[in-house]
Structure formats: structure tokens, C-alpha cells
Image (cartoon, grey):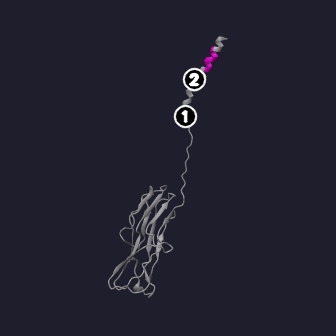
Amino acid sequence: MKNLLKIGALSLALVAVVFMLNTNAADTGDLKLRITGTSGSCIYGTNLNLWDYAFDYIGHQVTGNFLTTTWVIGADQWSCTDSAGVSFWSLTVASSDVANITTLQAAHTIPSTRVHIWSDNVENVSGYITSFSGVNNGETLNNTQVVIAKITAVGDAGRLATNHVKLAVDLTGSQAIGQYSGTLTINVPSL
């Protein structure tokens, strides 16, 4: 009986050793994480009123800041917030010719090659987005100009902004008297 008890005790000890050796066994599991984006948006000016200027025999340039959609001054900072991580987008501006709507004469039209846009360099306000440098050289709006652009891949989120966005129109000497009107086309990215 003593031997039977010794054999039983040894068996239990052997089973315990086997279980202790098995504690280092590895198992795998899944780690899942989903970071969801939200809708983004852009803030930009849509209207520009260069107000009234007196007739002049000498050519000159008139400059103004963009206004909000409700014609309030203060839209000189343009920004886009990409909260969805959209890849490669841009906010652009182009201008039509600026027609004299008083005289309706084609000869009095200011061509879009004499409409210019300026802004400060684009800054990464938050996040990890690489940006385009902006329109800081007074580029003409006869061609579409990029004001803000994201040039990084999908998944990168953040906010880009530029300050002091302004528009200028070159007037020739003896520019015809009258009221002028043109169209700015602002393409806003779908964020």
C-alpha cells in the first residue's frame, strides 16, 4: 500500500511538472482598432467688392480682401479641415473676364489675365498633412490657381490654412467708366 501511495504521489508530481512546463505555451488573438473619419470642411471667401474708384488716366491696380457669403469682411483666412483622411485634394480659384455691365462693350472688358490672387504660404495647423505652398506671387486667374492643396496619401488627416487671401485687378489708363462684374469659380474639395 505504501508503494501504491508512493506511485500515486509520483504520478501527481509528474502531472504537475507537465502542467508547469506547459505554462509557456503561446496562443494568438486578434487586436482590432478602427479610427473613423468625420466629414471635413473648408472656409473660404466667395465675394469680392472692390468698391468705387475714380477714373484715372494712369493705369493702376485695385486690391481687396474676400468677403464671406453674406458680404461680411473677414474671409481673408482660408482653411480646409480634412477629418476623413481623403488623399490628394485642392481648393482652387479661377476668374472670368470682368465685363463692363454699364456699357456692355467688349472693348471695355477687363480680361482675366489682369485679375490676380495672393495669399500667405499654406500652413499645417494640425495633423500630419503635407501641403502645397499657396499663391503668394500674384498669379493670374485666367487659369485655375491652387490656393490650398493636400499632397499626402489617404489616411492623413488635419487642417491646412493660409492667411491674407486677396484679389487684385489691373486697370489700364483710361479704363472705361461703369460698373464691372465677373465670376469667380471656387472649386472646393469634397471632404
Residue at the outermost left position:
58
Which of the 4 quarters of the picture holds residue 58? Answer: bottom left
Label 1 residue SS: loop
Label drawn at residue 37: none
Which of the 4 quarters of the picture holds residue 7? Answer: top right
Q: Is residue 52 visible?
A: yes
**Eyeballing the image, is 148 above or below 18?**
below
Label drawn at residue 26: 1
Could you tell me which residue is drawn at 44 percent across and 61 percent down?
160
Label 1, residues with CA under 10 Å away: few <14, some 14-19, many ≥20: few
Q: Is residue 131 visible?
A: no
Real-space CA distance between mark 2 and mark 1, rounded to the nearest whole angstrom:
18 Å
> Residue 15 or 54: which is nearer the viewer?
54
Label 2, residues with CA under 10 Å away: few <14, some 14-19, many ≥20: few
Label 2 residue SS: helix
Could you tell me which residue is drawn at 44 percent across and 67 percent down?
77
Would residue 121 appear left or right of 188 to someone viewing this image? left
Label 2 with label 1: CB-CB less than 8 Å: no
> Residue 188 or 46: which is nearer the viewer?
46
> In x, y percent, where is residue 95?
43, 75
Going by the numbered disc 1, the residue's amino acid type is Ala
Residue at the outermost right position:
1
* Residue 123 counted in the magenta span: no
**Eyeballing the image, is 117 above or below 105?**
above
Tell me which secondary structure the magenta stretch mostly adopts: helix
Residue identifier under label 2? 17
> In x, y percent, where is residue 168?
39, 75
> In x, y percent, where is residue 14?
59, 21
Whichever of callouts 2 and 1 sits on the residue coming sooner in the sequence is 2
Going by the numbered disc 2, the residue's amino acid type is Val
**Eyeballing the image, is 154 above or below 20?**
below
Q: Give the magenta range.
A: 6-12
